[in-house]
Amino acid sequence: MTQQQYQQCIDACLECMNACNVCYISSLKEYDLAMLRDCIRLDRECAEICSFAAQSMTRGSDFIAEICELCVKACEACAAECGKHEHDHCQACAEACRECAEACRMMAAVA
């Protein structure tokens, strides 16, 4: 595993974390909070897991593969939920989640 591969995955995780945080805050400002309840919950969980994954890779954790596998699951769930909503912040979040899931899937396979 090269440092560049680690950095690409870390960057994807941080971008996803940021997109999830933006989506979370933006969703709280929307009119129909009940419709966005699962989106809001998953945004928070995914942001936290992405942050943890990035920190774990930075520290060179022995559990990177397992943490990245968890990150893939969180990102896929968040992408599926946010993808249901037409808000720009939800669509941007879904895209960031899909990109992060792909980066973490590759990391988990080689870590």
Image (cartoon, helix red, strand yellow):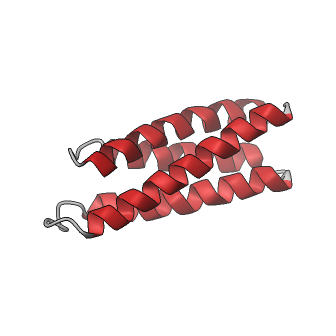
- Using the rendered image of the protein, determine whether residue 70 is visible from the camera's viewpoint: no
Q: Quadrant of the C terminus?
A: top right
Q: Residue 6: which quarter of the image?
A: top right
Which of 68 and 24 lies nearest the eye of the viewer? 24
Q: Position of residue 13 (x, y in %)?
A: 60, 47
Left or right: where 88 falls relative to 96? left
Which of 80 and 93 lies nearest the eye of the viewer? 93
- Using the rendered image of the protein, determine whether residue 89 is visible from the camera's viewpoint: yes
x 80%, y 52%: residue: 58
x 14%, y 65%: residue: 32
x 51%, y 45%: residue: 73
Q: Position of residue 92 (x, y in %)?
A: 37, 43
Q: Residue furthest left?
A: 31
Q: Position of residue 64 (x, y in %)?
A: 76, 47
x 62%, y 59%: residue: 51
Q: Quadrant of the N terminus?
A: top right
Left or right: where 49 falls relative to 75? right
Left or right: where 55 falls relative to 11? right
Left or right: where 76 falls relative to 49? left
Looking at the image, is 4 positioned above or below residue 79? above
Looking at the image, is 17 positioned above or below residue 107? below
